[in-house]
Amino acid sequence: MCPRIGLNLYTILQAATEVADEDGLESLTITTLANKLTIKPPSLYNHVKGLQDLKNKLALYGMQQLYKELNLATEGIAHGEKAIKKLAISYINFARNHPGLYEATLAAPDLSNIELQTEANKIVELTLECLSSYHFEHGQALHIVRGLRSVIHGFASLEQKGGFGLPFDINISLELLIDTYLAGIRSLANTK
């Protein structure tokens, strides 16, 4: 079977992102994607092996897009509190703008998938670079990166699920959360 002219992996991933962002990652199937692209489902098999392969490719694409946005947000700042704050806000904005694509990036990368490992490591390395002015030893810095991801993912997840019902500006809550985490990092750095 010949691939449909104009149909390529990028077009497929863009459409998959739209389906996942609009209806949730769990709604992404070969059939829903084919319907979105107005093609027959078998046409997708020229580009993906099946649903799991599609979701793996979407996770890789999502990590690439997340890294691109985080890198852009911290460009020219290099490290320190301002960089960490920009990184955290960019992360939250990515989750807000692409909830389905963001969800695709959440699982720990399959250790046998080198491409996913590489993209995940790029995000970790960027975050470590933002933390470099604190001079933590590498292992401790990785724990701090894990903590930062947990904090901002928790916020993003609660926001996506409608968990913030009080009538307060959510962005002020986000700023306070980041400032509190940064105060903790400062305190930890000062006790070394």
Image (spheres, grey):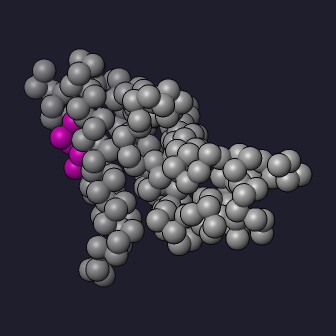
Q: Residue at x 86, y 47 (%)?
A: 2
Q: Residue furthest right?
A: 5
Q: Is residue 170 visible?
A: no
Can I make out residue 191 in this image? yes
Q: Nearer the viewer, residue 115 or 96?
A: 115
Residue 126, how many percent across, how many down? 45, 30
What residue range appears in magenta? 180-185
> Which residue is nearer to you in this view: 53 or 138?
53
Tell me, yes or no, whether the highlighted magenta stretch contains residue 123: no
| Residue 33 shown left or right of residue 82 in the figure | right
For the point 24% across and 41% down, which residue is it?
Answer: 147
Please tell me whether residue 84 is drawn above or below residue 152 in the rendered image. above
The image position of residue 178, as x and y in percent, is: 30, 50
| Residue at x 46%, y 48% (from the top left corner) | 105
Query: In the rendered view, would you say 190 is above or below 163?
Result: above
The C terminus: image quadrant: top left
Q: Is residue 147 above or below residue 27?
A: above
Where is residue 71? Give x, y as percent: 54, 37
| Residue occupying the far front of the picture | 1
Q: Nearer the viewer, residue 95 or 120?
A: 120
* Drawn side of residue 162 relative to residue 67, left or right: left
Tell me the residue at 31%/59% (across/down). 155
Q: Position of residue 56 (x, y in %)?
A: 52, 44
